[in-house]
Amino acid sequence: MTVILETQGLVKRFAGLTATDNVSFTLEEGHIHALIGPNGAGKSTLIHQLCGNLLPSEGRILFAGQDVTRLAPAARVALGLGRTFQVTSLLGEFTVRQNMAVAVQARLGGNLRIFDRMTGRREVWEETDELLGKSPLGKRADIIVDDLSQGERKQLELLVSLAGRPKVLLLDEPMAGLGHAESLDMIEVLKGLRGTVTILLVEHDMDAVFALADRISVLVYGRIIMTGSAEEIAGSADVREAYLGNEDELC
């Protein structure tokens, strides 16, 4: 498999705290790779370094073979690195369709004073409707975002990210705040993306992780203690002790 994202000995220090400690891992193209670990393990710090919001103290980040360690976030987005957030960052007063159109136009370029100029941009609206047509949200295209359920907002944020046509998508806890049924819906949506976009999934919902991930890395105290398949991770005594807990929690 082709490696599309790689970290080599990534270290991030804050005064006396080492938040990521010699983190090295590879993300293979087309895979869903989950990153799990307890609160305070360094997951968010690692994601911020991958996005360019934080510069590492040591180590390198390679994206599609290019050293992006010192590149600004916007430059990484231009190369094809996208992300979502734990808390959705949508335009709540606009419709689903309008939010998608903003994302499409942002990728295509041009004036971002959206609705005074976009009525004449046929290609923007055609692509917007094409993307929505492939999603359950297509039937909710004219609904104001503030009126959506939390699960629908998460799905929309995912679609907005996909409008940028990323090669790699960093998903920061897409199940956060969702009920059981909404989590199942999100799992199905993400399964549908397998092979079309490479995903690094940061998630606490172990049912979702085991249902989705081709590979799983376990981060504890800033270090990756193991990478393996769902079966290998679930069967590891070290992982159980460090994070997963007793056997009942893995069922």
Image (cartoon, rainbow, N blue to C red):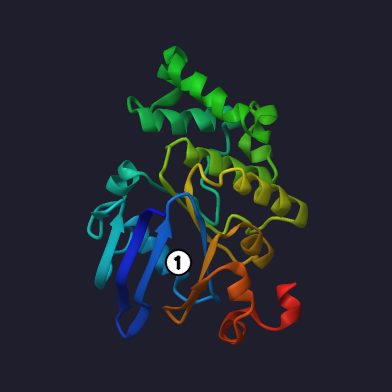
Q: Quadrant of the C terminus?
A: bottom right
Q: Is residue 230 above or below residue 106?
A: below
Please tell me which residue is depicted at 34% across the width and 25% down the height of the picture.
111
Q: Quadrant of the N terminus?
A: bottom left
Kind of residue at badge 1: Ser
Query: Quick check: 56 above or below 17?
Result: above
Which residue is more in the foreground, 106 or 220?
A: 220
- Number of numbered callouts drawn: 1
Q: Position of residue 119 (x, y in %)?
A: 47, 15
Residue 216: x and y, percent? 53, 67
Picture residue at 42% right of the left edge, 16% below the top: 121
The answer to which of 3 and 61 lies nearer the viewer is 3
Q: Residue at x 56, y 68 (%)?
A: 229
Q: Position of residue 193 (x, y in %)?
A: 56, 44
> In this image, 123 relative to 95: left or right?
left
**Looking at the image, residue 64 lies above or below residue 137:** below
* Quadrant in which residue 214 is drawn: bottom right
Left or right, residue 58 beside residue 107:
left
The reply to whether residue 39 is in sight is: yes
* Neighbours of disc 1 within 10 Å: few (<14), some (14-19), many (20+): some
38 vs 68: above or below: below
Provide the residue designation for mark 1. 44
- Residue 95: in sight, yes or no? no
Q: Seen in the image, is 230 located left or right of residue 125?
A: right
Q: How far from the left and from the top, in percent, is residue 44? A: 45, 66
Q: Residue at the far front: name it.
A: 1
**Tag 1 secondary structure:** helix
Answer left or right for 216 relative to 249.
Answer: left
